[in-house]
Image (spheres, helix red, strand yellow):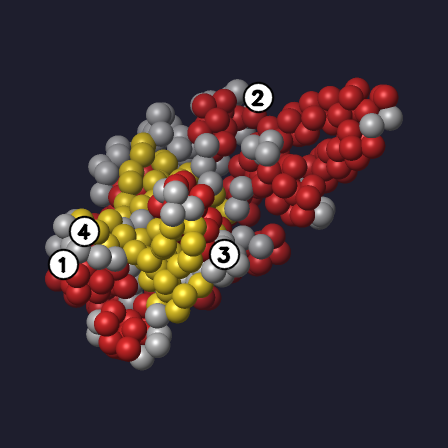
Amino acid sequence: MKLGIVGLPNVGKSTLFNALTDAGAESANYPFCTIDPNVGVVTVPDERLDWLSELYQPKKHTPAVIEFVDIAGLVKGASKGEGLGNKFLENIRRTDAIVHVVRCFDDENVIHVEGSTDPLRDIEIIDLELIMSDIEIAERRADKARKAGKGGDKSFLHEAEVYEALLKHLNEGRSARTFDCSDEDAEMLASDDLLTTKPVIYACNLDEDGFSSYETNPYFLQVRQLAEKEGSQVLPVCAKFEEEMAQLDEDDRAMFMEELGMTEGGLSRLIKCSYALLGLISFLTCGPDECRAWTIKKGTKAPQAAGKIHSDIERGFIRAEVVSFDDLKSCGTMAVAREKGLVRSEGKDYVMRDGDIVHFLFNV
């Protein structure tokens, strides 16, 4: 999974990126500090996998990973190539979802590219640039479908109608992810790399006081209301806190979080948000050679989950031996779980569940 961290220049993107990935990206108080995207790969914390590794003592412990990309700050006119616009837009196109960092604090010592704090205005600036880029794509697709449909081919005529309706929607300043269409049409649009179809997490960057009382913070409440309207996620963060915590060892970090009344750090909360937004779950495989977490979409059936491990396992799938993590943990060992009848034999139509521990049987 690849998440692009975006936002106007100087809203705390690189500070948050550094804290989440400990990658040491340059962070400074001037626009376009980030020119080329910084990339950091982090492991997904999973207590279930840690427990399995304690049980099996495997040669390898392999958690799921997320790639964060810190993308250059955007300015008005990016869709026309202003600033670092073209490069910025292409970098977003390569991500699975967008983490949109929005400044939600006042501080005269930190320069704001627009001169004042206004999260809804800042969000609109970036949204409009992405929408302008999508309008160009939709216009080309509509024109191509119209030409192809001159012979009366109904599929091309329908395609032209869909893109014309999308164009009208985009020209009203609305993103493609809020465009109402059938699942089949949505699948067609998804193949075009439209920027505004990408799911969004709004990371509200608050100062220390704002973070401690974010539920009543007017800037945060504005962004949350917007996110609810468009089906996006919203996450309160304090990039400064996260930066300070990243520099501490595990014990000091736990003490720091306890003093702040935090039960988990920003990375863990952002990962949970990302999984929920993208409809992802994890299943686990375990044994003396390796304990590993695998990320799949909700609704994935057993053979396709097996294909995440190797295409041969999917092709030769016979059945899956499945036990839930909670059942295995309560039993203590796989042998006890089998004795209690908690290890199930599932076929090709089995829909995987989060936390399933699986052994695939196959024959190629």
Q: Residues within 10 Å of mark 4 (few under 14, many from 20)?
A: few
The numbered mark at residue 57 is 1
Q: Looking at the picture, which amino acid does disc 1 mark?
A: Gln
The residue that disc 2 covers is 80
**Badge 3: few (under 14), some or many (20 or more) residues near its Cα, within 10 Å?**
some
Q: Is residue 310 visible?
A: yes
Label 1 crowd (10 A; few <14 / some 14-19 / many >=20): some
Disc 3 and disc 4 in contact, CB within 8 angstroms? no
Which callout, 3 or 1, points at the residue further toward the start of the chain? Answer: 1
- Element carrying mark 2: helix
| Up-down relation of residue 318 to residue 164 (above or below) | below
Residue beneath disc 3: 348
Separation (CA) of disc 4 from disc 2:
53 Å
| 3 or 1: mark nearer the eye | 3
Which of marks 1 and 2 precedes in the sequence? 1
Name which residue lies at 31% across and 46% down.
65
Label 3 vs label 4: CA separation? 26 Å
Q: Position of residue 353 (x, y in %)?
A: 44, 63
Going by the numbered disc 4, the residue's amino acid type is Asp
Give the residue type that dot 2 points to: Lys
Tag count: 4
Give x and y (percent) for residue 211. 36, 60
Residue 295 at x, y percent in the picture? 39, 51
Q: Nearer the viewer, residue 69 or 10?
A: 69
Front: mark 1 or 4? 4
Give the alpha-carbon distance from disc 1 to disc 4, as whole Å.
9 Å
- Work out how far the residue at label 3 is from the one at label 1, CA to CA, in angstroms: 31 Å
Mark toward the start of the polypeptide (3 vs 4): 4
Q: Residue at x 58, y 41 (%)?
A: 197
Res 338 quadrant in image: bottom left
- Residue 289 is tagged as 4
Give the percent coordinates (x, y) of residue 290.
Answer: 21, 51
